[in-house]
Image (tube, rainbow, N blue to C red):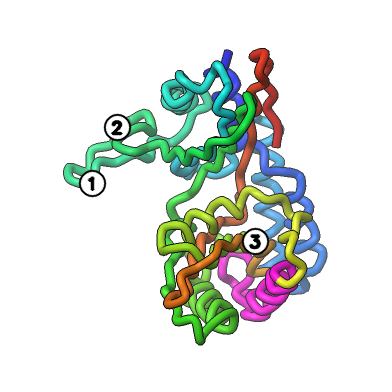
Amino acid sequence: MLVDAIVEAIRLAVTRIPDDVVLALKEAYAGEEGEVARFNLENILKAVEIGRDGSIPVCQDTGTLTFFVRAGVESPYLRGLEGAIFEATRRATEEIPLRPNAVDVMTGKNSGDNTGRFVPVVHWELAEGSEIEIAVLPKGGGSENCSALAMLTPSEGWEGVRRFVLERVRKCGGKPCPPVVLGIGVGGGADQALLLAKKALLRKGEERHPDERIAEIEKEILEEVNALGIGPMGMGGRTTALDVKIEVAHRHPASFPVGLVVQCWASRRAFVEIKPDGRVEVWQ
């Protein structure tokens, strides 16, 4: 039952773009005046519709499957959970199907089932209680290639964050298949900044950071990115980014880490919740 639920969450993630992302795409379409930008957004929305109606992957790059697991330490289902995630990945690859995207770094050989050394990627967070929540985030390679880390000096601060993000988005142009969603992690160490950035992509469009100061920066960076004029698929237009999400951690006094994780327009995600009594719920 658990493996079945994870397979279903993977299927939901790769075939059905979340409603908040679709709404943002439609709003972008309504706000574009350029013929090319509107044409690109129209085709994106058609791909969304085809994926949803046909239950087929919206994009041929079904990505590297990334799982964020928040596990209650008292759950009776914790022991076999990692095995279930790997088995679900193998099954989903065959049944949905997913494109095999796990390649050995030395030989270049594809495993054929999206599993391998440290793949799929599983991030664990232990919690009190006996419930388990699993977030599924399929991450495409093109957008991942535009992710980056900056180890700023504390004196650069949030102005440095803005400058780094804008320079990186400008340099990448159309490579990550815009309009993108930007996850930004600030603070912690180098590894934590990038992890926070990727985790930020799980938040829905209407969810702003609970700290009003950070929420305001999210909106400001979104406006500045869209002012670049890169536009849908990098061919010009008003909408380069659909959203910006920031997560923060305390930092060392000597450093100011900033992680940027870029997600393409197909901002895919799904969730699984395992109740203490074994009931399972899948949703977006």
Residue that badge 2 annotates: 111
What is the CA distance from the residue labelled 2 to the residue labelled 1? 11 Å
Q: Residue at x 68, y 68 (%)?
A: 37
- Chief SS of the magenta region: helix
Tags 2 and 1 touching, CB below 8 Å: no
Relative image position of residue 81 (x, y in whole percent)? 48, 23
Residue that badge 1 annotates: 105
The amino acid at mark 2 is: Ser
The amino acid at mark 3 is: Lys
What is the CA distance from the residue labelled 3 to the residue labelled 1? 31 Å
Q: Residue at x 29, y 41 (%)?
A: 103
The amino acid at mark 1 is: Val
Magenta-highlighted residues: 214-238
In the image, taking residue 168 as reference, residue 272 lies left or right, namely right
Say which label, 2 or 3, has the lower sequence index: 2
Relative image position of residue 3 (x, y in whole percent)? 52, 18
Residue that badge 3 annotates: 245
Please state which of residues 186 and 47 is positioned toward the viewer in this rendering: 186
Please state which of residues 93 and 53 is positioned toward the viewer in this rendering: 93
Residue 127: image quadrant is top right
Magenta-colored stretch includes residue 223: yes
Please state which of residues 216 and 87 is positioned toward the viewer in this rendering: 216
Magenta-colored stretch includes residue 136: no
Q: Quadrant of the C terminus?
A: top right
